[in-house]
Every structure is written in C-alpha cells, then in structure tokens.
Amino acid sequence: MTTFEQLQDARRILEGVAHHTPVTTSRTLDDIVGCQVFLKCENLQRIGAFKFRGAYNSVSHLDPQTRARGVVTHSSGNHGQAISKVGQLMGIPTTIVMPTTAPVTKRAAAEGYGATIVEHDPKVEKREEVSARLVEEHGLKLIPPFNHDHVIAGQGSAAAELHEDVHDLDVLIVPCGGGGLLSGSALATRNLRPGCQVIGIEPELGDDATRSFRTGTIQRVENPQTIADGTRTESVGDITFAMIQEYVDDMQTVTEQSIIDAVKYLFLRLKLVVEPSGALGIAALMSGAIKAEGKRVGVILSGGNVDSATMTRILAEGRD
C-alpha cells in the first residue's frame, strides 16, 4: 500500500505548485446539519479539482526519456484535465482517453492544455483497453486515475493540509470514485489525526466501493448513470481497495436528488461552484445519510468542473 512517507514526499514536490486551498465555513450550514463543518475547497485547486495533486506528483517521478515519449491516461474529465495541465507545464505530450459522455467543459479544458483526445464508447469498449492499446502502439507511459501510489500520495496531500489548518476534527467525509482521494485522505488522517473517523461517500447508482467495503471483495458496476460523473468508475483498484479496507471507518451512499440539492445549496447559499461528485459529502450530511451532531466535521469538496448545461438543470430541478 501507499506509505505516509510517499505522501510526505508528494507534499514536498507539490509545495509552491499546487494551491494550498482554503477552508470555508457556514453557520447556516452548521445549523442545518447540527455540527461544525469545515469545507476543504479543492474546487479552487488548479484545473478546478484535487486531481492536479496526484497528476503532478506522478509525472514528477518519471525519468526524462519516459517524459519525452509522452503519457496517456483514461478519465471522464478531471484526471484528464490534470494530466493535460501537467503536460503543458512540463512540456510533455499527453493523450487522454475520454468517454463520449464526458462533460463538454472537461474535454474542452483538456484540449486547451494541449492534450490529444481519444474518444471511446463506454458501452462498447472499456477505457483501460483503449489506454493499453495506446501504450503498446506508441510507447506511452500510463498514469492511471487512481490506482497508483504516486497518485494516491498526491491526493492525500489535500487532507493533510486540512488537518494542519483545522485541528481536532472528529470526522472526515470524502467523495469516492476509484478511491484515490479516499485512500490518500484516510492515510493522511491515520497519521495526523488517528482519532478522526473517515467516511467515504458514493452515489447510490455507483455504489461499487460501498459494496466492496461491506463484502470484503471488489464489486463492480457497469457504466453507472449518476449525475456525479467523476464517480463513474467500474470499481476501485487493488491498491485503493486495500487501503480503504485498512484505513476507512465507513462507507455510505446518497441519492441523485440529494446530490442535486447539495450542489444547488452550495451554489446559492455559500456561493461555491461545486460539481456533483464534489458535493457528495454535503449531500450525505444534508440528507441524513451521515449524522454527526455536535462534532467537528471536515468535508472535501473535490472539484468544481460542472458544465453550464448540468448546472442549469440542477438549478431548475433541485428543491429550494
């Protein structure tokens, strides 16, 4: 499994490159959910999501010859944007395998950073198969979106910052797709605040990690149709699963309506633009999926890359 030493090394690499994102609070939100909530705003990170941390840390470990050949990844959006941005910063060619269903803004951002986009239909071919073919044909280096030690270590730096900025958290709530952010956050928490409970959150429609956590074996879900596009992974990885089993205290799921309500609340009341995947923790608190009365609760808002069409639909559909 990824080590705390690797996480600390990632923090040194990211210092002065990744944003040390702010923590914000809201008395109104505290009153609604009955606890003190501290929001770690990774929606304000470079490229608009925590994924920049793991991408930069991973590519930083590649030797010059590997960098020159270029890197490839598969991503519904944020990791692809992150790898693209890192490639732009380091002068490295990047190729991003994206589903045809990827949000327009995320694809446009990756292309804007200079990436080559390779589309695939998730109903026909798995993204991992497309990436593997590109590695074989062009000698590219694969940087997977979550199941990689340097990716996990980089993602965990967000939680490490939160624990240093806000002392004595009782609970840390983290969105979960492939488990990179969750496993890295749990690793940071176990070393910096051992008494803090770590809870992962998934959409009900993409509950593979929750079922994996509860059964002790990796479960899968085919092409989950959740609005939280950043969590549309088929399953967790072997590394992230092992770390979730070791360090995470609980997993919970939230409904599509609760996700919509959370995004709308964050936008209208806290003036924060947060994508559906990034709002899972607030959805869990506001819906009652997690009850933390009287506790100090950290919530990672993992990203803010929501396209205008999705946000328009959310603002129209979500309850006031």
Image: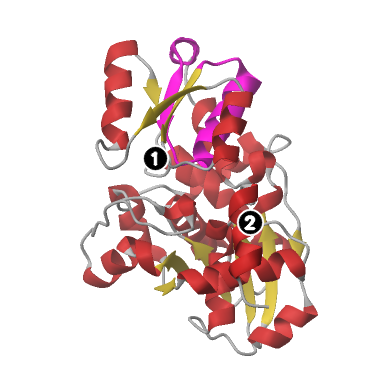
Q: In the visual, does 197 lie left or right of 248?
A: right
Task: Please give the range of residues in magenta.
Answer: 64-93
Q: Quadrant of the C terminus?
A: bottom right
> On screen, 243 above or below 117?
below
Residue 120, image x, y percentages: 35, 32
Relative height, residue 144 to residue 7 (above, below)? above
Q: Which SS type dominates the magenta stretch?
A: helix
**Of the residues shown, which amino acid type is indicated by label 1?**
His
Residue 257 is situated, as x and y percent measured from the top left of the image, at 51, 73
Residue of label 2: 311
Check disc 2: other Cα within 10 Å, few if <14, some if 14-19, many if 20+.
some
Residue designated by label 1: 148
Q: Is residue 21 left or right of residue 110?
A: right
In the image, what residue occupies the spot 48% across and 81% down? 289
Could you tell me how far apart the alpha carbons at marks 1 and 2 are, in whole angstroms?
32 Å
User: Helix or strand or loop: what does disc 1 sit on?
Assistant: loop
> Residue at the spot x=52%, y=84% of the render?
288
Any part of residue 91 in sight: yes
State the image coordinates of residue 143 (x, y, percent, origin top left): 42, 31
Does the magenta-highlighted stretch encompass residue 83? yes
